[in-house]
Amino acid sequence: MFMARSSSGSKNGIRIVVAGDRGTGKSSLIVTAISETFPTNVPPILPPSRLPDDMFPDRVPITIIDTSSSVEQRNKVGEEMKRADAVVLTYACDRPETLDRLSTYWLPELRRLEVKVPVIVVGCKLDLRDEQQQASLEQVMSPIMQQFREIETCIECSASRHIQIPEVFYYAQKAVLHPTAPLFDQETQTLRPQCVRALKRIFILCDHDKDGALSDAELNDFQVKCFNAPLQPSEITGVKRVVQEKLPEGVNERGCLTLRGFLFLHALFIEKGRLETTWTVLRKFGYNNEIRLDEDFLPPSFKRAPDQGVELTTEAVEFLKGIFSMFDNDNDGAIHPAAVDDLFSTAPDCPWNEVPYKDAAPTTALGGLTMDGFLSKWALMTHLEPAKSVEYLKYIMYSGDAASAIRLTRRRRTDRKKRQSERNVYQCYVFGPKKAGKSALLDAFLGRPFSDSYGANIEERYVVNVVEGPSGSKKFLILREIPEDKVKSILSAKDSLAACDVAVFVYDSSDELSWKKTAELLLEVAGHGEDTGYEVPSLIVAGKDDLDPYPMAIHDSTRVSQDMGIDAPVPISAKLGDFNNIFRRVVGSAENPHLSIPETEVGRSRKQYHRLVKSSVTVVSVGAVVALAGLAAYRIYAARRNSN
C-alpha cells in the first residue's frame, strides 16, 4: 500500500556543497561522480559541476560546489555553505585526525553560520583505510550523530575503486527532497508532533463519511490521489493485516483503518527508509519541508492601504460557528482549553498560546471560550495577521479560498468623508500615563475582577470582545493598550494611527500630574493625526472616579475638551465596576468617524489658512471670469463699430 511510483521534488534544482579538510578527497569524489572516471590530476578547486539529470529517478537537477581548504578562503566557504541545500562533509578514512575535525571544527562551524540543511558525512579513500581497524562505521559515527542531529547519513566510499560514489549524492539529494528530521525523531523512534498533526489533518480530509476511520473505498481514493494508482483488494487486505498484527487498535471492528493505524503505517515506512512515501503524501496535500502549508495552497500577501482593515466574511464566521458547536462537547456554551487544543491538533500548533492572542478574549470561570470569545480571537488574528488567519482556517478544514474567508474594509479616510463606518471590527488605542488605570480598563472589558495590586505593563497588550453599539448591531472591539514609554516610538511611523478607529486617553482623576500627562499625550496624538492625515475620534476617560478629584479637575478637563472640540471626560471606576457605558461609547465613536476628532491650535490655524487660500482662489477665479467677459464684450463692440 501507499506505493510511491515516482516523486517529484519540491525544488527546481538542488545545490550540494562539498567541504572538508585538505586532502580528504573532495575534488576526486566530485570528478568521479560526474565522469565515472577516477582523475589522475585534480585541480585545487573545481568549478560548479552538474550531475546528469537522469542519474537518479527523481530527475531533479543537482549542482555540486567544490570548496577550498585554505584558511584564507574560509569566509567564501562559509558563504557557499549558507547557500547550500545540503552539505557533504568529507574526511579521509586513512587519517583519523580528519574525522576528529568534523566534530571539533566543521559541524560547529555549520551551527555558528546557522546553516540548517541536511549534512551527509562521507569517509573518502576507503581503499586506504588500515585493515587492522576493527570498529565499524556505525560504532565510529554513533557518538558524533548523537551530538549533531543535523547529520542525515554517514557513508564510506572510494573514488579510485568506484565504491559507493553515486550513493553519496543520491543520499544528499534524498535528504533534501525527503528529509528525515521534520518527520521522525531518531532518538525516540517516533513521529514528530508536527508530522502527526499534518497526517491527522490528511486522515480527516480523506475520511469522507466522517466516521473516524478509512474504509477500503476511502483508502483507494487516498492512494489514487497521492500516487496516481489504485490499490488491489489483496493489497488493502495485506496492509490491514500488517497493522492489525502490530497494532490491534489500528483497524476497527468494521475492518476500517483508524487514525492510529494510519500513523503507524507512516512510522513503519520511515523506519524502513521509505521516507519518499510519507513526503509524497504530505506534498500532495500542500505541505512543504517545514510541514506547513506551502505558499501555493495559501493566499498571496494582502495588499491594502494602511487605513484599511481585514475582517472575516459571513461565510467564514458561519463555518467557525459550526466548528464551535462541534467542539462544545458538553453543550455548556463554551469550549474548554483541552477542546481548543483538540481543535488545533491538525495545525502546526495552537496559534493562541502566545501573545498577543493569549488571554486576549473573555473566558468562563473554568477557562472556557464562549462563542463570542471564540469569534473574538479569530477577529483579532484576522485583523493583525490575515495571512495567518487564513492559514489556520485551512488547518481546521475550511474548504473555501482566501476570497471567501476574508474581506478588505473601506479605507478609514473614506469612512470619515462619508460620515459612517460599516466595519464589523474596530480597533481602539488606549493611551495614558502609568497608574492611570489602562490595564484595569482592559481587564474590565474581559469581565475580570478588579485588583488593587499594581503591576506596570511595559509591553503592548491586546484584548478583544463583542460590544453592542448604539446602532444596535454587535461589533468586535479590539483594545490596544499602549504603555506611556512606547508612545514616541509608535508615533515615529507616519502611518501609526492609520489602523486606529478610536483613541482613548485614560487618566487618574485624583492625580493632577496624571491629568497633565494625559493632556500632553492627547495633544501629541492629535497633532500627529493632523500632520499625517490620519485623524481619529478621541475620548477622554477619567479613571478612579471612586477617589476624590484633585482641585480644578473638572475645570481643567472641561476647558481642554472644549478647546479641542471633543466630548467632556467620561468618569469611570474600575473598583466600583461603574464604566458609564464606555465600551458602547467607543463603538459609537467608531461608527461615526467624522465626530469627536480633536483639533490642536496648529491644526486649527492650518485649516483656517487653507480655507482662506481656497476663498482667495475662488475670488480670483470669479474676477478672472468677469474680466474675460468684459474683454469679450469690448471686442464685440469694437468689431461692430469698425464694420460701420
Image: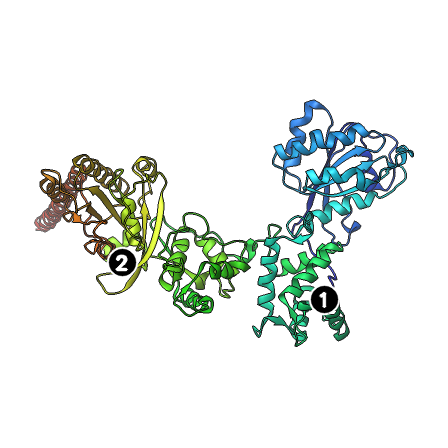
State whether residue 423 is above or below residue 461: below
Position of 3 relative to 530 (above/below): below
Residue displayed at 86% across by 38% down: 158
Q: Secondary structure at mark 2?
A: loop
Label annotation for residue 555: none
The quadrant where residue 513 appears: top left
Quadrant where the N terminus sits is bottom right
Left or right: residue 70 compared with residue 309 = right
- Secondary structure at numbered mark 1: helix
Instruction: State how far apart marks 1 and 2 are (Cα).
Output: 59 Å
Local crowd at mark 1 within 10 Å, few (<14), some, or many (≥20)? Answer: many
Q: On the picture, is 487 further left or further right than 607?
A: right
Residue type at mark 1: give it: Val
- Using the rendered view, name the quadrant where residue 259 is placed: bottom right
Residue 140 position within the rendered picture, expressed as x and y whole percent measured from the top left = 79, 37
Residue closest to the eye, 178 or 77: 178
Q: Amino acid at mark 2?
A: Ser
User: Which of the numbered marks, if any, corresponds to residue 421?
Assistant: 2
How busy is the neighbourhood of tag 2: few (under 14 within 10 Å), some, or many (20 plus)?
A: many
- Earlier along the polypeptide chain: callout 1 or callout 2? 1
Q: Which residue is mark 1?
A: 243
Q: Position of residue 495 (x, y in %)?
A: 33, 43
